[in-house]
Each structure stands twice: as structure tokens, then as C-alpha cells.
Amino acid sequence: MIIYSNHKNNSPHRKRDKSLGLPELIAIALGGMVGGGIFTVLGLSVAMIGVFTPVAIMIGGFIALMAAYSYIKLGVYYKDEGATYSFYKKIFPDSPFAASLIGWWVIFGYISTMALYAYTFASYAISGFSFGEIEWARKLVAGGVILLFTLINLWSVKGMGKIEDLMVYSKLIILVVISFVLINNSQTTLPVMLQGNEDVSMLSILLVASITFVAYEGFQLVINAVNEMEQPEKNIPKAIYSSIFLAVLIYVVIAIGAILAIPLDDIVQNKEYALAAGAENVLGHWGSDLVIMGALLATSSAISGTVFGASRQMAIIARDGYFPAIIGRKINRIPVFAIVSMSLMAFCLVLLGSLELILEFGSVTFLLVSLLMAYANFKVRHLTQSSPFITIVSFIGLLLGTILIMYYEFIHQPEQMLFIAGLYLLLTLGAWGYSWSKTHHLGNH
């Protein structure tokens, strides 16, 4: 039997310092999205569909809006910083494994995006040096930036929020300048470029929208901050919808500028730091420096925002018995052990995985979890006052995206698909082990 909660706010009822207003919340969401985002996926997208990359970006943004609908409805109804995990725990109270599984998937999805952002930061940071192509050098720099933002998040909520504001809004100004300069130095026009790309199919465009979907991962971090925000009923939807719209706008404008100003071969050849390499060829050294500064700010704020939101969710899951108990402990309301655990595992992923593997694992995870959120929202649509039509359309769109990315992996990179499947198997076994242990423990009392 499924029992639904009658209380919208199931968080502990105690007075909190509401440190985060709408600007900080938009900054956290944008920080989570515009990080690995355009700086990581541009080269891959251009290699597959060329000049149609902005179209794939817009489709990805539309799918993200559909996914956001269920997150917002559930977030406003439950007001729980455990977000995805807590929603499942409350909607399916008789299935500890379901809550544990989605909790493990979500947290390790965030860990993979932290690794992605850190790797991208390192690629841009040392791209101008003679040792820029040395893999271990990139990985050490990636570890250093993870450590830096671990310490910042351990410092204070207010401090993190203000630093996030500064980084996100500074990088937005830089990205606008980059876009303007690239478009102003365009070497061709879109109609001319389209003439050589008539053979690109709609299926290929949808495929790229799915593979690069991780570029929109991050908007749900807003819900993890519900205990530190003002007016969640108004600020959750405002922050999430605004941040997705701004992310789409930024991605599309930069993609158009890059395609018009930088030869496509250069973008494809330098996938890991495509914008910096291309900008140097077109604009000279100052152009490259500007792009690198934008990339460093973007990836830095993405790491910070992800650590902030996801560590709070991990602490909730741990306190419920699905991760080691120590991870759930807080010191001065900051989940210190969750922050440190996530950062260590992200660095391990950086050491073990390739950029492309981390990117695709993140996209698959985000699609699957968003799909499960749409299903959960449909289940309690009478409580969240959700439109059945929008929820079903969202579910179908996310399902198609998941099928497309798995199809691509199966056809083009079966070994990588097996590796990703192996990761999911390990996560599923871990989730099952903790849920069984908790159920067994309760049964003995």
C-alpha cells in the first residue's frame, strides 16, 4: 500500500537563517549548469552535427525544461533539501530499495559532473603551457581545484553564496564579451555554412541533444538549498526556470559565435579546450586569455555549486542509513563529511576515467533520474497539482533521450557502454546492500 504524506513541509520545524535569496539561487543553478557545459560539449557536438550544434543545444534546453517541471512541483510541495531522494522515500515508503537506488544514482551522477568540471578547468588552465598536454598534470590541477572549493564550502553557507554570486555573474559578463567578439569576427555566415551540412539528420541532432544533456545538469541543486532560502514557493520555480533560460541563451550564442569565427576542424581537433584554441587563432593571445578566464570561472562555480547542493542531499541519505552514518553528520549546519567524501570520490574519478566517459556517464544518469522524477510526480500529481499532460510528455521525451544515448553507445562505443553498465551495476549493488541492511536491522528490532 502506498501512503502519501499530508504535510507539505516535512523538514524539521526549527528557525533557520535564510541566507540565500533569488540572486544566490540562480547563481547556484547557473553555476551547476554553465560549467562543464559549453566548454566541454562544443567539440563533440560540432564533430557530429557541425553547424546544427545550436539546434541540439536548444532541444536539450527544452528537454531540461520538461525535466524541471516535475522537480519544481515536487520541490515546492515537499520542501525537503534531500530533493530527488527524499521525494522517492515519501512517495514510495514501502520500498527502501527504490529510495536507496535513486539516492546512489543521483549522488554519483553529481560526483561525475564534479570530475567533469574539474577536468575541464585543468584542460583550460594549463592549455597555454608546454606541459598542457601531459595527462597527469591535468589531473593534478583538477585535484587542486576540487580541494579549493571543498575548503570554501566547509567555510560557510553565506561565504559560499557570495563567492558563487561573484563567480557566476563575472563569468556571464565574460561569456557575453566572448560571444560578441566571436560573432564580430565571423569568417562566414550561417546560410553559407548550412549549404554544406544538408545531410545532417534530425535523428543525429536529437542524439547530440541527448549525449550533451549533462550541460543542463545543475538546476535541481536549487532544491537542495531549500532550508537556506527565502520564500521557496516563489523562489524555486523562479530560480530554476530563469537559470535554464539563461543557460540556453548563453550556450546558443557562444555556439553560434564559435561556429562562425573558428574553423570547424579547429573546434573538433581541440575538443578539450576548443574555445581557447580557436579564439587564439582568430583573436590572438588576448582572445585566448579571455576565453580561459571565462572557462575557469565557469568550471569553478560549477564545482562549488555542485558540492554545495549535492553534499546536503548525500547527508540526508546517510542519516537515513543508505550511506555510512558518519557522512550524515553536520558541523554548524554544514555537512562536512559529505563534502569531503564527494570531493575525494570526484578526484578518484578524475584519476581513473577519461573526459568523454565522465561526460556520457553524467548524461545517462541525469536522463534516468529525471525520468524517475517525472514518474514520481505523475504518481502524486493530485498533491502537487501537476498537469498530467505535461508530466506524460516530459516522461516520453526523457525516455526517448535515454534510449538514444544508449543506442549511440551500443553502436559506436560498446566497450564504453559496458564500462558505464558496470558502474551502474556496482552502484545498484551498493544501494541494495544498504537497503537490505537497514530493512534487516529494523526487522530484528
Image (cartoon, grey):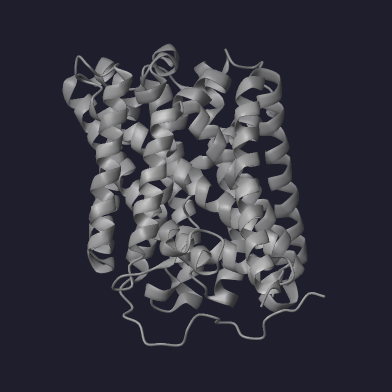
Q: Where is residue 209 shown, x and y percent of the image?
A: 59, 35
Question: In the image, is residue 18 above or below residue 140?
Answer: below
Furthest residue to the right? Answer: 1
Residue 233 in sight from this viewpoint: yes
Furthest residue to the front? Answer: 444
Query: Foreground residue, 3 or 248?
Result: 3
Query: Foreground residue, 91 or 202?
Result: 91
Quadrant (top left/top right/bottom left/bottom right) for the N terminus: bottom right
At 45% from the left edge and 16% from the top edge, which residue is drawn?
A: 268
Question: In the image, is residue 119 above or below residue 160?
Answer: above
At 57% from the left edge and 52% from the top edge, which residue is drawn?
A: 104
At 70% from the left edge and 78% from the top edge, which residue is drawn?
A: 383
At 44% from the left edge and 55% from the top edge, which residue is drawn?
A: 243
Q: Where is residue 364 shown, x and y percent of the image?
A: 61, 40
Residue 256 in sight from this viewpoint: no
Q: Where is residue 392 shown, x and y percent of the image?
A: 76, 57
